[in-house]
Image (cartoon, helix red, strand yellow):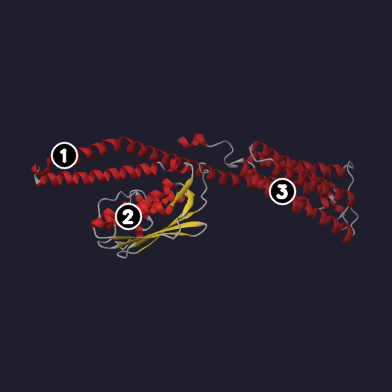
Amino acid sequence: MRKGHEQVAPGSSQFVSAASLRVRLDWFNKLRWGAAVGVLLAVMVTGVWLRIPLPLGPLLSTGGVLLLLNLLYVIRNRRLAPVDISAEIRLVKLQMLGDLVALTVLLNLSGGIENPALFLYLIHVIIASLLFKGREIFQIAWLAILLFTGEVMAEYFGWLPHHHLLSASEMTHELPFILMTLASFCLVLLFSAYMGASIMSHNRAIKDELVLRQQDLVEADKARMDFFRFVTHEVKSPVSTAQSAVETALELGGDTMSPQVEDMLSRSVGRLQQASRIVRDLADLTRSGMLKQEFLRVVDLSAMLTRVVANQSDMAGRTGQTVQLDLPPKPIVMTTNGSMVEKIMENLVSNAVRYNRPEGRVRVTLADRRASVWLEVVDEGIGIAVEDQDRIFEEFYRSVAAQEATNLGTGLGLAIVRKFVAELGGEVDLVSAPGSGATFSVTLPRHPKGRAAKS
């Protein structure tokens, strides 16, 4: 058995939580409003318009009791939060018991076995199949059968008064007709209970399997993140030490070092720098959950973006690129997770510079849109093919064109962007074509869901 099986709560194939069951109870209460109003209208039509001699007072009283009970259910649901799923299940069973008893009383007052409304019991069997499992569905069906059979037989033996419908045949009082009707009634309800139980059992089995697979995916993702976190922790120090050692060797060697050795050590430094970037990106990716839990703080996005662009000026200058920064006259200040926003800016701007053409231009724009903040980064570089535009946000994915342009990328930058933007409640869009550069647009809401800022 898979490990995920142990984490499935009992009854999860019925409801995920008490809150989800409460939603169904509220829906059930709305149906009951309609049923009670329908009963009152039917009584008025049959008693006043059709002038059928029925006990209008008791019928109206029964309909009124249904309305009162439903009002109590609604008040209870509004005042008590859904916490205990067992309490919610007990309540819905109590509601069904009250409904079935009320329906039996209504049938007794309006013709009993002569009334075609007797099959309204079927509605409760169908609803039970949506709410309960097999045995409980049959309990509702048998309760309906016992109540109606008891009412019919009590009328037949004279224990309860019978209110005859004008259009009903005298045959309805004969025992063979009564027994045949009760047998048909019993067969229909039990067959409906069986079909409902079978269908819902199949659906719940599918749901349980989906729950288990989801748990497996969550566990696999957690294991992957734990592995990445372990790797970054264990690799960071050796890589930094090796990079420092090689850089020191280059400085100490000076002019006495042969060109071949100097070239080899220089390439080693480049590879170690790339390894350091991978370690940093992995650390950012695995720290996203912790970053999301940080207190939100007031951040000057204009100053932050200015600093990010300035940090990329050296790399841009090596290939003659121009980085244009467009900021609004007034600084854009918002309450957000500063660490995550800065990582988004850094990855987008550094990618634009890295994959831009020599002497090309990078345009970085920040704009205030009242309810949100808009960031756009445009380059004139290699562009991104349509078939790669979805995949570039995957971890470690680098398109063929990107690999040919430079070997310095880690394949994690855009994955971090998408993850952080999503966690901040924003959206990231891409417009690009091969050889025509790329435009990345990020929209961040001014009021993301999160913890309050520190005072």
Q: Is residue 97 above or below residue 344?
A: above
Q: Is residue 318 above or below residue 238?
A: below
- Mark 3 and mark 2 lie on one chain; the one further toward the N terminus is 3
Q: Is residue 66 left or right of residue 206?
A: right
Disc 2 marks a residue whose amino acid type is Asn
Q: Residue at x 33, y 36 (%)?
A: 233
Q: Give percent across and percent down for residue 197.
A: 62, 44
Q: Is residue 167 left or right of residue 254?
A: right
Instruction: Check disc 3 and report its element: helix, strand or loop.
Output: helix
- Judge the density around disc 2: few (<14), some (14-19), many (≥20) Cα neighbours within 10 Å: some
- Judge the density around disc 1: few (<14), some (14-19), many (≥20) Cα neighbours within 10 Å: some
Q: CA distance from mark 3 to mark 2?
A: 56 Å
Q: Is residue 378 visible?
A: no
Q: Give percent across and percent down for residue 297.
A: 48, 45
- For disc 3, the marked residue is 29
Instruction: Check disc 2 and report its element: helix, strand or loop.
Output: helix
Instruction: Check disc 1 and report its element: helix, strand or loop.
Output: helix
Q: Give percent across and percent down for residue 172.
A: 84, 51
Disc 1 marks a residue whose amino acid type is Ala
- For disc 2, the marked residue is 351
Q: Is residue 394 left or right of residue 143?
A: left
Q: Is residue 247 visible?
A: yes
- For disc 1, the marked residue is 249
Q: Give percent across and percent down for residue 137.
A: 67, 42
Q: Residue at x 31, y 44 (%)?
A: 278
Q: How many marks?
A: 3
Q: CA distance from mark 1 to mark 2?
A: 31 Å
Q: Is residue 387 above or below residue 63?
A: below
> Contact, CB < 8 Å: mark 1 with mark 3?
no
- Mark 1 and mark 2 lie on one chain; the one further toward the N terminus is 1
